[in-house]
Image (tube, grey):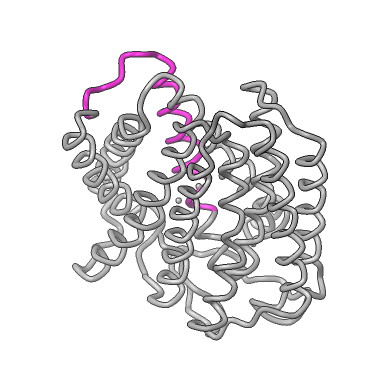
Amino acid sequence: MNGIRTALRGGPVIAFLFVIMWSSGFIGAGLGTAVSSAVTILMWRFITVAAILLVLQFAIRKHRMSPREVAVQALLGLFSQSIYLYSMFGAVQLGVTSGIVSLIDALQPICASALAGLLLSERTSTRQWWGLGVGLIGVTVVISGDLGLRETVPAWAYLIPFIGMVALTVATVIERKVEPQAPLMDALAVQCGASAVFFTLVGFSTGQAAAPTDPQAWLAIAWLIGLSTLGGYGLYWIILQRRGVTYVSSLIYLTAPATLIWGFFMFGDAISLLSGIGIAICLAGVAVVHSRQATTSTGPAGAEPPPLKEAPARPDTARHPVQEP
């Protein structure tokens, strides 16, 4: 039990699980969009998971959310799920590989850390900025290598994931600014419910609302619900609460190499030598951000974060999770 509690304090185990589960979403996008449209996959994904979570919320009823809390969670769902995933899945459907979409997503640490400093007074150390800069260089190198391998993909398709990256950044800053009180499962229920409404409207307006018939589509939906929604998003908000914007955002640099490796083994996506060099640079940048001396967003260097509780007292430097991939 002590080992489990230690893992949930934002240490390497929970960071590793986050990287695996967050990167699984890009693989799920590849699985689903290979046999169905992005809108169809996302619509049925969120209808299914929202129904499950809303039933659980009704059965447990541990926390009654105020209209303001519901509105905040719906807004977070719109940015962190609806717009974010619509952009990422759309890019994959256009032919951008899941690994490259995740690498463009990895620009989020730069945006999130900059906004955290401007709007939240959450300090990013010089060493962390160096690490984020190195990671950005790595992302640029990897994308350059991939462009040489994907000559049939229009260059403008690489711009679409930037919309999702900005949307996730906005959701991250809103959560830290508003400090919502809702527990994890309640928050996810509202967020997924809002996303279900969003994608249902898009699905019916574009003629893509019919339930998929290919078993692979439902495999992708189950994959996305279990690993990405109930895993990746939840861990994102938990780590955000305990370690701050810069720490959790920098982990996204690692989801990009993880996704490239998944894509290589599952889809046969080639990894160029230049992309491999870029992956190594990304890893170096994350190592700098996560070094003992650089981790300052939640307290003194090396300080151990407090254990997770569902509704702990709120110190000045901690935030409650949006309460997830």
Q: Nearer the viewer, residue 316 or 222?
A: 222
Q: Position of residue 105 (x, y in %)?
A: 56, 52
Using the image as rendered, state which of residue 33 and residue 66 is in the foreground. 33
Q: Is residue 97 magenta?
A: no
Based on the displayed image, in which of its 4 quarters is residue 124 positioned?
bottom right
Viewer-nearest residue: 270 or 102: 270
Residue 239: quarter of image: bottom right
Q: Vertical placement of 302 versus 48: above or below?
A: below
Q: Is residue 16 left or right of residue 241?
A: right
Taking the magenta stretch, the answer to whether it contains residue 221 is yes
Is residue 44 positioned above or below 296 on the image? above
Q: 217 or 311: nearer the eye?
A: 217
Q: Is residue 321 above or below residue 270?
A: below
**Residue 293 relative to residue 33: left or right:** right
- Left or right position of 243 against 153: right
Q: Look at the magenta stretch and give its main secondary structure.
A: helix
Question: In the figure, residue 68 lies in which quadrant?
Answer: bottom left
Indicate the position of residue 212 as horizontal and vertical percent values.
30, 20
Image position, residue 299 (x, y; %): 68, 80
Image coords of residue 168 (percent x, y): 46, 59
Taking the spot 80% from the left edge, 53% from the top edge, the residue there is 281
Q: Residue at x 40, y 60 (%)?
A: 323
Q: Residue at x 73, y 66 (%)?
A: 133
Query: Which segment is the magenta one?
Result: 209-235
